[in-house]
Amino acid sequence: MKLQTLILALAIGVVFPAVAVPDRGRVMLSDLNLRTDGDSLRVSFRVGIGPNATRGHNYKLTLSPVLVGGGEERPLRRIEIYGRRVELLDARAGRPYVRGLSTGDLRHPVAGALRASEGDTVEYSASVPLESWMKGAGLRLERWRSGCCHRDTLPVVELAAEEAPAVLSAAGVAAWAAAVSAEGAATTTGDSLSRRLTFVEPFSALEARMHAQSVSPGLFDPDMPLDMGQSADTPRQQDIDKYIADGEAGALMVHFHQGRHDLERHFRDNNATLVNLVSSIRALLNSSTSRVVRVVIVGSASPEGTLAFNDRLAWNRAVTLKEFLLRNTDFPSDSITLFNGSEDWRGLRRLVAASDLYEREEILRIIDNVPVKKGRELELMKLSGGRPYLYMLEHMFPDLRNAAFIKVYYENLPDPSAEALSRGAALVSAGRYAEALSILPQATPGSRRDLLQGTSLLFTGDRDAALPLLERAAAAGESEAESLLAQIRAVESPRTFGTVILPGKK
């Protein structure tokens, strides 16, 4: 058997030129092509028939293509090639030695067969419902030659070898979808600010800390009496102290001159601090994804001087900052909470503990064990002839002359479309495509939704509806959509094979 190299199959619908046949007694198959077409498998090739292909004008040559793969077989439409005088078989059909021969092996074609004559060039096409084993199926050709009195079975010809089928994989999209689900809704204004500004926090985080520390939920009650720090009742002051101690980290600091509560924007780094404060509150007020729940301002003063004076000073500093916010934002007054941190002994202790003062341990002992009202400051002033106190007065107290901290608390607003996208992505990641399709129409429109919907449609069998969505997602830059489209092209691209010249009868 002679084989020649096949020229790659051309697109369907192109008019092919006539095929040259190597000699009079042969049949040549060319442009062999197996491809998926929706839910069908289509087999096509061109048949060039020599003028003496039946090896006798009174004979019929039958070619029967058969799909084979995975232990399965599926016969396809036959090709029947008739000799020029085969019609004479009818006249001989009544003879006794012909009566036992099937009329299908005489002049009458099998239903659905492609009929051809010697010297013809014909286009063969057959389509069968696609089954999974067919995606990598091989193709063989069974042949026989029949005449008026006998039938010759000819050798089977292998046209295409069986191969492992190309399959679609959603692994890449599944990993991408898991990341989309983990990311959740698009970043909100509050989340974005909190990553950039330490004084902006989600209110839920504060509530969790307060619950863990058994802080009263009424701490931010707008009707709570605004007592000064050291004159507040003991249970409330304990809650305030817990809140201040826990909230100092990352707070926004505003500084004041010694003994004063008027706000100077260009003192130390106050200007940048106040710009950040106002801009963050305005951003939250104008946001559709987050809202400000509460702004907390804690006033404080350095420990120098009398407790009564410092109590009033700390409170007045907090009030000054509240008035500044009300003038510069539309934030409601009853959502601003003021606390009196009074004398900032916590801040002083923190600075001393981090210092290399020779008397550090003794200073810490005095701060921890001598009550303010029992002369704590006087004890420090007497320590080592007053040298440590003078050092603290010069180097530490200026950092304590501030509104101890400002915190801005926010909460994210519900976004049903973003939540639907996140839930749909989680379902796609888990391979639950039908469920994802019931949720994704409610998701935020865009390339992500297109990719998730397209993937779900593809793997639930609706290729035609999936392709436009995947193509749109790929055009928008979603690489996983392009990867999936490339897989589809690979799976659906025709398998093409070489030209086969069938051996003739010797």
Image: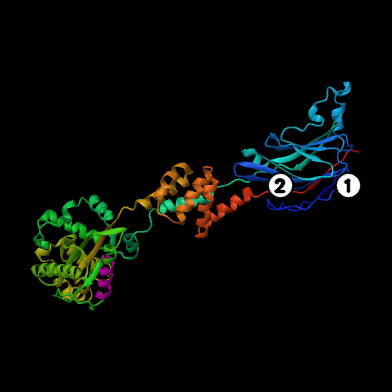
Q: Quadrant of the N terminus?
A: top right
Residue 11 x, y percent position in the rendering: 68, 53
Residue 12 x, y percent position in the rendering: 68, 50
Judge left or right: residue 466 versus residue 490. Answer: left
Of residue 324 and residue 353, the one placed in the foreground of this image is 324
Mark number, residue 307:
none
Other residues around mark 2 within 10 Å, as few (<14) / some (14–19) / many (≥20): many
Give the residue pinned by disc 2: 33
Of residue 204 and residue 377, the one placed in the foreground of this image is 204
Magenta residues span 270-281
Judge left or right: residue 82 versus residue 297. Answer: right
* Amino acid at the residue labelled 1: Asp
- Is 206 situated above or below 129? below
Judge left or right: residue 425 versus residue 253. Answer: right
Secondary structure, magenta segment, majority class: helix
Residue 216 in view of the camera: no
Would you identify the image quadrant in which residue 243 lies?
Answer: bottom left
Labels 1 and 2: the sequence-earlier one: 1
Residue 463 in view of the camera: yes
Residue 426 x, y percent position in the rendering: 43, 47
Q: Is residue 457 one of those drawn in magenta? A: no
